Image (cartoon, helix red, strand yellow):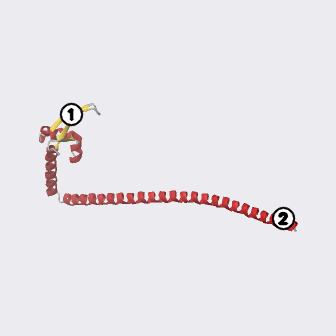
Amino acid sequence: MSYNEYKYSSFDLMNIFGIKKGSWQSVKKKYNLDNYATKIFDTSQNQNKFMYNEQAYNILKDNYNNKIIEEVKENPKMLALISENTTLKATIEEYKNLNTKFELMYNEEKQNKENILKDNITLQINNENFKNQNNKLSEENHNLQKEIERLKNRNFLARLFNK
């Protein structure tokens, strides 16, 4: 990534560092952020837009960190809140990871269940086809047995009358 690559809009920087919309101009002037910006035309919003590079981000980041350090010195409770906030963020991230793992497991189980149901349906269809085939073969076997009996009786009668 180039150090002069312009990738932050003013709204991005305001959101990242908690700068209110009304105070953006004074922050911009205080740190000479226009030196690290380029003006582009945003066709989607049909207006000019300033894009800032990594140097502008780093200037605001350093200022933000210094401001936090000063506030912590003035109010020791802030340090506890910051560490609690960091812990909560880590916990949330951990829960997100767990949630993702559970979603993957759920989707795999769901897919396995669907595959088993499809296999079950296929087996049921095959079973029905085999039953139908078996019934036809049984019927054919029965007809052949009847024919054999008829031929045996006919042969028996023929021998009986020939005597």
Left or right: where does residue 150 sit relative to residue 35? right
For label 2, count other residues whose C-alpha is less than 10 Å away and answer few (under 14), some (14-19) or many (20+). few
Give the residue number, with chain letter if any, for mark 2.
158
Left or right: where does residue 85 sit relative to residue 126? left
Find residue 141 and report its image quarter: bottom right
Find residue 143 and report its image quarter: bottom right
Rendered view: 47 above or below 133? above
Residue 11: horizontal and vertical position, in percent? 23, 41
The image's mark for residue 159 is none
Q: Nearer the viewer, residue 160 or 130?
A: 160
Q: Amino acid at mark 1?
A: Ile
Assign the C terminus to one quadrant of the image. bottom right
**Which residue is depicted at the point 78% across and 63% down?**
151
| Foreground label between 1 and 2 | 2
Q: Nearer the viewer, residue 154 or 100?
A: 154
**Disc 1 from disc 2: Cα separation:** 112 Å
Q: Amino acid at mark 2?
A: Ala
Rendered view: 14 above or below 111? above
Find residue 137 and report its image quarter: bottom right
Name, please, the residue furthest toward the front: 163
Left or right: where does residue 17 sit relative to residue 134? left
Residue 124: horizontal and vertical position, in percent? 57, 59
Q: Earlier in the sequence, mark 1 or mark 2?
A: 1
**Which residue is depicted at the point 45% across and 59% down?**
112
Residue 96: horizontal and vertical position, in percent? 33, 57
Residue 22: horizontal and vertical position, in percent? 21, 39
Give the residue number, with chain letter if any, for mark 1.
40
**What is the total number of numbered labels drawn onto the structure image?**
2
Rendered view: 85 above or below 46? below
Q: Nearer the viewer, residue 37 or 24?
A: 37
